[in-house]
Amino acid sequence: MLLFNKFATTTTTVWPLRRVAAVQGKTVVITGASQGIGRAVALKLAALGASVVVVARSEDKLEELVAEIRETGGEARAIACDCSDPAAVEAADLGAAAPWMVVHCAGAGRFRFLTEAEATDIKFCLDAPFLAAAHLTRKLLPGMLERGGRLVFVQSPCGICPIAGATSYSCARWALQGLFESLDADCAGSKLKPQIVVLGETHSNYFSNNPGSRDRIPPLSRLLTGAALSVDEAADAVIRAVASGSRIYYAPFVLRATTLFYHFFGPVVRFLLRSTSKVDYRVMMINE
């Protein structure tokens, strides 16, 4: 248990700077940058010398972020765009040259059973992360394949093992996983490297934006995914992933062990998660 607890927490404040130095002077596009993990990633990459292009729907929050980066001597510009809308992505001015890296942080969606969800809820979950990542990558991919660089996808453990009561959200995360795996195959032999960063629960504004969702996380899930990360720790993990060059990066580290355990003993993990879930679909349906 002591060994387990050692890996259940993570401190990611020091990066291998020689490898991260590759971002200096290079253009990096970050989606979902108006708040949470995306915002923290943008601040840290700008501090490391990257020229960041921050993308989200909220123009006011993006402009505040750009001002903060420029005040500290960094380079940044904002693009207000709903990346789930292909027409908006095509119209967005992302610059003449392909970026060296794209970090897909956009994500949304309230945890609900399928019968609780409206049709618009299902589409909303798919919009971010999956459709936003797919449309933006589709636009930038030709130039990035020629130039080389990184495609980084920030992922949830629900993209590995779904939990009860988060149907549309889990489906969207599995779709993002499929996008990453497919692009990894498509880009084989090229200078472009896709990476995925699987982050455990993070103390961001995600759950305040989606009330009731945290209550559906089984207590066992927190044991399997490790201690919750702060937004800064999550952003540090993303940068560590870039520095390491790992195809798949996990934070906290215990997530890696959990993924392996789920791969070999999936029925056991699913049974334990369902047994400790705080929500019971059958009871809910009977009460209705």
Image (tube, grey):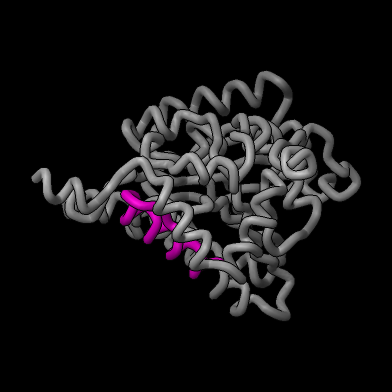
Task: Point out residue 64 in the picture as x, y percentages from the top left corner.
Answer: 51, 22
Q: Is residue 266 magenta?
A: no
- 159 or 145: nearer the viewer: 159
Q: Residue 46: image x %, image y %? A: 70, 34
Q: Position of residue 40 (x, y in %)?
A: 61, 32
Q: Residue at x 67, y 71 (%)?
A: 146
Residue 67 in which image quadrant: top right
User: Which of the two residues, 78 or 13, is positioned nearer the viewer here?
Assistant: 13
The magenta stretch is 162-180
Q: Is residue 189 left or right of residue 160?
A: right
Residue occupying image coordinates x 31% and y 55%:
168
In the rendered structure, the answer to whether residue 255 lies left or right of residue 3 reads left
In the displayed structure, 79 sits above or below 178; it is: above
Which x, y percent locates residue 245? 77, 59
Q: Nearer the viewer, residue 169 or 49?
A: 169
Provide the major secondary structure of the magenta segment: helix
Q: Let me know if residue 100 appears in the view.
A: no
